[in-house]
Image (cartoon, rainbow, N blue to C red):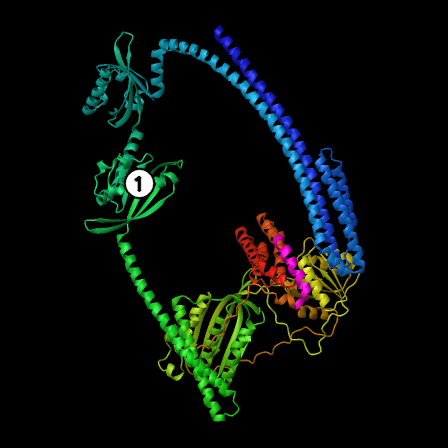
Amino acid sequence: MRKIALTVITLVIAVLMALSGFIFYAGMVQKRTNAAANWIRSSQTTTNQAKAIGTLDYRSTAGIKDYLLSNGHTNLMEQQLQDSILGILLRLTGNPHNTPAQQQRLQAIQQQLIQRRHTKHHIISTANENLEEARQMVLSPDFRQQGRGLQEIITSYIRTEQKELLQRIDKDSSYTTYSFWFTIILSTLTLTLLVGESRYIFKLLIRIRTWSNQLLKSEQSFRRLAEEAEPMIFKCSLNGFFTYVSPRSEEITGYSNTTLTGKHCSLLLEDDEFERMQRFYKYQLSNGDEYSSLQLEIITRSGKKKWVEQLASIITGDDGKREFECIVKDIDQEYRKSESIQYLLRRLEAILDYMPSMMFVKDMSGNYLLVNNRFMEVMQVRKENIVGKTDADLHYPWVSRYGEICRQVMNTGIREKMEETLTINDKTYHFLLTVFPLRNTNHEMIGICCLGQDLTEKTLYLQQEKEARKKAEEAQKSQETFLANMSHEIRTPMNGIVGMTQLLLQENTLSIVQQEYVTAIQRSASNLLVIINEILDFSKIKAGKLELAIEPFNLHEVINNAVFPLQLLAREKGLNFSARIHENIPADLLGDEVRLNQVLINLIENAIKFTSKGHVTVTVTLVSVDKDHSGIRIGFKVEDSGIGIPSDKIEVIFESFSQSHKGNSRHFGGTGLGLTICQHLIDLQNGILKVDSTPGKGSVFYFELPFTKDPFPRRQSAAPAEGTPKQPLLGKTILVVEDNRINQQVAYYTLKKGGCASVDVVDSGMAALEILSVKSYNCIIMDLQMPGMDGYETTRAIRNSGINTRIIAVTASALDGEKERCLQAGMNDYVSKPFQKEELFQKIQASAGDDASTDPVPSPEPAPAAAPQPDSPPLASGATSPQPPQKKIPPISFDDIYLMMTKDEVKMILEDLVLYMPDYITRLRQYIEERNWKEAGNIAHQLKGNLGYVCMHEAVQLAHEINRNVVFDPIYEELSRKAARIEELFTRYQPDIEAHIATFR
């Protein structure tokens, strides 16, 4: 024991030495870390101060530019900025950590700042005398080179500071490394001492353990058996007679321990089970096994059979004789449950064997664990030749093909598929092999399984279908070729006929009879072109190649264009014709105006064609509006008092080349394709078409179509009346409240071009209130969305302060009710971005009290429809009119901006657009990533107006949707996708803008 105590003391001393080393190392590391942190903070402060000099210089330059752009109407902060720069420079110069190299760079920065200060003072003094010369000085290469030189010196100073910091960190790292290795060496020596002393203690413990085991061997044997057993313990002689039975025997056998003592163990066993047990224990005795385990089915006192597990040990009794000492555990429930599982497993194997798909299972070592009958039948192998073997042990042709995909699944853990074609007994089979991993409850891969699905019948079906499709495509191609040739062959002479008739009608020498003949020829040619168009449209619909165009259009223009010529046709027949459009329907929409026009003309022509007397009425109503007021659904109703359609013929009229009566095509004409085409066109636009008709009284055709409100309607500027002044705003004073730089410039130059005597621009609501407290204006142009105090709050504050100056809202928002909200806030009128300058000038003139009126003249109410007449002919499908070509909108255009300002002003706006738009788009994506929906909406609002100046319609629409969605339904993935698309579009068309700017030089 003394040796053990000395060894333990030695170990404790060694551990304390190692612990002391680690504490020393930790203390030094903490000290160095604190010093490094202080140095990093000091370096960060120095870096931030150096960057602040560059930022303040940039703000000083921007302030001078704003001062020049506003013609000296903005306040200069030059002196305050220069004082701030000087203060920061003094703090940097007094930094005790500065190296000689840094001091030299600080002196260079000071010299550069002095030079720029003199230059800026010279620009400001020049601006007081010659504003244009001052602008040229700001844009000169020398002035820009000064700014870049200053930034380069500041960057060099920051790099020097960072280099010094890195050197300090490297020094601390080296010292820490030396301390670490010193501690490692000390710990290694301690560990060596610890291992040596532990080996000595271990040898002593082995000796003690050997002595203890020899003394307690029999006692430990009995205790171990008792701990592993459950209720019953007994001893019996080698002949099978019980010599000792524990009291709990009654729980398992039903017999008390006193009853069983002295009895033979065959009392609890059937003859076959007793013989099996006897053979087992004879083998244990002959083999000399110390322990054994055997499962037996015993018979309890009640006659019930029960499964038990018996653990037997051969011991020597007090009298020196050998006997069995046994522990009996009740396993009846577990055994029967296991038997049930085995039964289910056998059932499962039977199912797998007789399933129609091939199947085999491998473990992770590549050994085949299972193959079913279908696999053996197809591959012509036997189960015993496969199970338990690997691919290396097998030499069948399929082994190499399947082995590769099996290894791939084992390596990746991902399901793989392959197609297999086999020929067996002159018959070809097609299989789809799917190899997938098998996993346990811990999701660990334990093997793979391959299922081969028989696709022979499906493959044959697909081959037949492919051949049939090929024949159908060839037939379709032949049909398209025929239609194309027919169209070409017919249109070519028809073009000559129509052209020559138009030339003849222009001749003044034709008699009245000749003019009637030529008109009849022209009408027949037009009808023939209508039939050709219907056949071509029908063929496109059947081939699934008819595409819809989503473009902006004016609903009133489309309906007027469709109704006007047909109204004349109706009047020629003596019919009352009227068209009504409800006032609550927005006029500017996005959709396919050509197809809408085609459907309307077809239905109205049918109504006129099959109505001999009475009326034809067209009604357009608003059916529904989406919750965000951007999507609407419009209903169109064409009602006539014609011949009507029998109820059993309503479905027929929508079939190809069909009409309600056999004689209609001879009497009224037409191909029977018009309504078929209308039905397909409405279905393509997710609309509905309904018919309600009574023979002899007339028909009502009603259809609904969804549209999207155009967020930026393109208004046509009216031609100026003779004598209109070129500068309608001559002498006016205007205040522009706008936070976006580009919009500020557009508004400023547009108003100045309109003749304004004074245009002041402020970038916030607070600035507007300050300037209004000391100066009055004829009109205020107010942006609605601004950071801080928006346009609504600013307007309310202006009205609350008693200022009654007229306020016109200018915004890119296209939400319903925007104008009403502006009026409620106290504004007087409303203009949408991008605005037309004529419209803005008219609004300002009206606001400033000029005589010019901007109110639109109301259109006359349509005449009421006549009452339906009882006697009229039936409706059938008719012909459609030739459709005008669809208008293509360029992705980018500079036409609108030239209408608002001069060439030089356009150049400045486009340069700012190229300069600032990437930053705006980056900030938009950043705000979306941060889920800062308010700021994202503000940026998107600015992008709408800025990109509208170059007519980048898709990007403007995306910005509008972002601005709307951040309020109603902010979905991160959708907003992020749209912002990325805006960036992609601007990146794509930025070279076009830059190329246009280059044309000014």
Inspect the image, locate mark 1, and give the three-letter code of the amino acid beneath it.
Gly
Give residue 716's quadrant in the image.
Answer: bottom right
Number of other residues with Cα within 10 Å of mark 1, as a class: few under 14, some 14 to 19, many 20 or more: some
Q: Which is more toward the observer, 12 or 854? A: 12
Residue 93 position within the rendered picture, expressed as x and y whole percent measured from the top left: 75, 38
Segment colored magenta: 899-919
Q: Name the residue under label 1.
A: 403
Q: What element carries label 1?
A: helix
Q: Which residue is drawn at 21% across and 44% down?
A: 377
Dominant secondary-structure state across the stretch colored magenta? helix
Inspect this view and state whether residue 456 appears. yes
**Residue farthest to the top, as pictured:** 2
Residue 920 in the image, given as x and y percentages of width and height: 62, 53
Please give the name of the residue rendered at 80% of the width and 55% of the height, measured from the top-left corner: 125
Task: Report x, y in % for residue 369.
Answer: 28, 36
- Name the residue nearer the viewer: 178 or 671: 178
On screen, residue 425 above or below 800: above
Quadrant showing the C terminus: bottom right
Which image quarter: residue 217?
A: top left
Residue shown at the point (75%, 67%) measured from the top left: 756
Placement of 586 over or under 294, stated as above or below? below
**Residue closer to the observer: 182 or 335:** 182
Give the mark count. Answer: 1
Asked if residue 878 can be seen in this view, the reply is no
Task: Please report the residue visible at 45 percent of the width from the left and 68 percent of the height from the top.
Answer: 682
Q: In this view, does 269 lie to the left or right of 365?
A: left
Magenta span includes 694: no
**In the picture, residue 281 is in which quadrant?**
top left
Image coordinates of residue 226 in percent, x first then y, are 34, 18
